[in-house]
Image (cartoon, rainbow, N blue to C red):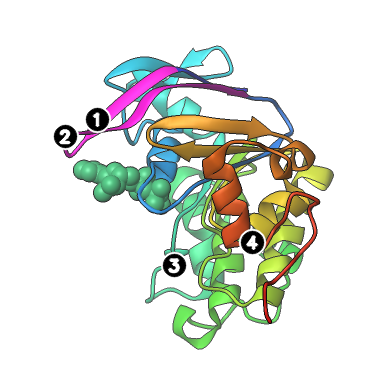
Amino acid sequence: MITFENVTKRLGNRAILDGVSYRIQKGEVFFIVGPSGVGKSVSLKHMVRLLTPDSGRVMVGNDNVSAANGTELEKIRERFGYLFQGGALLAWLTVAENVALPLREKTDMTDADIMAKVMDLLKMVGLENDSEKMPDEISGGMRKRAGLARALVRSPEIVLYDEPTSGLDPVTSRTIDSLIAKMRDDLGITSIVVTHDLHSALSIGTRIAMLYGGKIVEIATPKDFVNSKEPEVRAFLESQFITKEGVWERNIK
Ligand SMILES: Nc1ncnc2c1ncn2[C@@H]1O[C@H](COP(=O)(O)OP(=O)(O)O)[C@@H](O)[C@H]1O
Ligand SMILES: [Mg+2]
């Protein structure tokens, strides 16, 4: 579905992606993990041509998104929903109007049809009673869920999630995880999730790729990921109290 073919991208005089290749299959919940500044968001941006590789290419199905322009690029982008880091709701619009925005801008659906679709989505993310609230009247978790509803409003095949659980409490984070898993189970959506949150990756991921030093240092199922021998992966797991057996262990004496 999405293929990185030997992608190299330099930013600020550093090879952020240094000959990266991988393929994401249709229907996966594919995680990209790694420390801050390692190129996770940069990876997502290549999938919708917000960034273009210096060399190599990114394919979406049979389309070379890295060379696409104009209506061809528009068509590829229509296949995607994007939950940006931070949620990014417009402060001066209600929750419902934020979710409705892509339909108002990009379709000629009637008001009644738009609102029916918006309310369906708000119900799915558990915000049916908050549609008339303003973004600053709801919690961070609710804003993420509203952002998710907006990402889904045009029925995308693929959804990109940039740190969907960052800044949320653990219980709310698990709710977001369940929603991402539900998108795949109910709607067959392919998901690509960028996160620091290994709990999410291990519980709902089909595969986890770890970026480090411009390279994919590991790409594995959750079960194999916790058993990885790569030192960067071990350090990352241990920083979140995950041992080789995949159990939680804190060294509190
Ligand atoms: N448009 C840009 N211009 C220059 N440097 C950038 C740009 N976008 C990202 N970077 C740099 O690329 C690196 C990776 O960024 P990013 O993918 O956002 O990291 P993260 O893995 O935390 O999402 C960072 O060092 C960042 O400063
Ligand atoms: Mg980022």
| Amino acid type at mark 1 | Arg
Quadrant into which the C terminus falls: bottom right
Q: Position of residue 214 (x, y in %)?
A: 38, 32
Residue 38 in which image quadrant: top left
**In the image, is residue 13 part of the stretch drawn in magenta?**
yes
Crowding near the residue tagged with mark 3, few <14, some 14–19, many ≥20 C-alpha atoms within 10 Å = many
Asked where in the image residue 51 lies, by quadrant, the reply is top left
Q: Is residue 144 left or right of residue 198?
A: left
Between residues 124 and 38, which one lies in front from this camera angle?
A: 38
Classified by dominant secondary structure, the portion drawn in magenta counts as: strand
User: Closer to the observer: label 2 or label 4?
Assistant: 2
Q: Which mark is residue 89?
A: 3
* Type of amino acid under label 4: Val
Distance from Cα at disc 1 to Cα at disc 4 = 40 Å
Number of dots carrying numbers: 4
Query: Which residue bears the numbered disc 2?
Result: 13
Residue at left offset 55%, top offset 51%: 235
Question: Which of disc 4 and disc 2 is earlier in sequence?
Answer: 2
Task: Give the magenta part as a residue range.
Answer: 6-23
